[in-house]
Image (spheres, grey):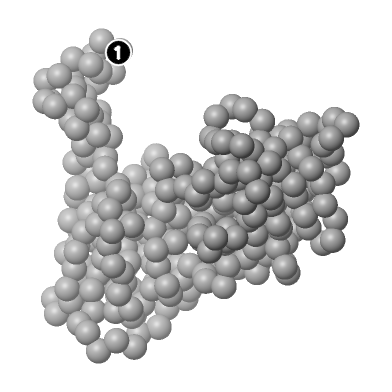
Amino acid sequence: MSTNTPRAVFVTRETDYELLLAHHATRDQARFFLETRGQRLETIEARHAQFGEVLKGARDSVPSKWRQTLVKRADFDRFLFGPEDVVVAVGQDGLVANVAKYLDGQPVLGVNPAPELYDGVLVRVPLARLTHLLPASLQGDVAVEKRTMVEAVLDSGERLLALNEIFVGHRSHQSARYRIAVDGVEEDHSSSGLIAASGTGATGWARSIMEATGTHLPIAPDEQAVAYFVREPFPSVATGTSLRAGKLTGAGLAITSRMNDGGTVFADGMERDHIAFDWGRRLVIAPADRALNLVVA
């Protein structure tokens, strides 16, 4: 363990109110924009204030001898998380997924600032418990869910990590064309792309695909496995549809791009942080050797 002073790192994303002000410059312009669409600025301001109160309460829970800092989601890729950090995600479940790939074993506590709005699958630590859980997390005296992550490695060495899922496809509405190989079986595909999901991700995008296709691939959040799903595979004289879905536990899923331009790979819905996947590039997707340490209240 590091001998540095412990640090609480609070991670957040902009509130709807902050985003409105950034787009419209002034409060009055934001109000006018909303009122012309039958909405009230006061509702969004109240949610912003509620978030501020929860964040303040969380920061007040930090032991007096600790350091603390605040990092917005847009800055995750420029922030250096240290081994002495305890990460507190104040926001929606997706915020935990967004920060997970930048961590390497640090404990994560999720706080839900608006239980009436957000499900709280990953952000379920009560604010009142933070005073106890922050030091206990650093000492390893807490229950932790080790949630499996998904890893995608390109032949060039570029790498993406995801807590929920990785998407492979075309950046537009064109068909994605690629060759897929798993367990010694290969097939050329033309589809809407594919996703590879962890057990955590199996409750989100992957769940909607399973319900729509009648596919059932049970996978636990801590299971060292990944499920893949091909979206709308198209059968033709050159493309098949037999490799539609499956569970990966070993060597992984190999995908070779057949797209001259526009191929893309991104993680957890963050299209801005993507890898280009053009003709001939080869990608392997498998369970990652890194897990998210999610503290259980």
Q: Position of residue 117 (x, y in %)?
A: 39, 39
Give, as a three-letter code, the residue at label 1: Gly
Residue 26 against residue 211 in the figure, above or below: above
Q: Position of residue 84 (x, y in %)?
A: 29, 79
Q: Nearer the viewer, residue 275 or 140?
A: 275
Residue 38 seen in the figure: yes
Residue depicted at 32% across the width and 56% down the height = 76
Residue 194 seen in the figure: no
Q: Position of residue 102 (x, y in %)?
A: 39, 63
Residue depicted at 52% across the width and 70% down the height = 291
Q: In the rendered view of the protein, which quadrant contains the C terminus?
A: bottom left
Question: Dot 1: within a 10 Å radius of its alpha carbon, few (fewer than 14), some, or many (20 or more) residues?
Answer: few
Where is residue 20, by image quadrant? top left
Which residue is farthest right?
237
Q: In the rendered view of the protein, which quadrant contains the N terminus?
A: bottom left
Residue depicted at 82% across the width and 46% down the height = 187
Q: Nearer the viewer, residue 264 or 1?
A: 264
Q: Position of residue 59 (x, y in %)?
A: 19, 62
Residue depicted at 79% across the width and 43% down the height = 188
Residue 253 against residue 108 in the figure, above or below: above
Q: Nearer the viewer, residue 208 or 273?
A: 273
Disc 1 is placed on an element classified as loop
| Left or right placement of residue 99 versus residue 163 in this view | left
* Residue underneath mark 1: 38
Where is residue 295, by image quadrant? bottom left
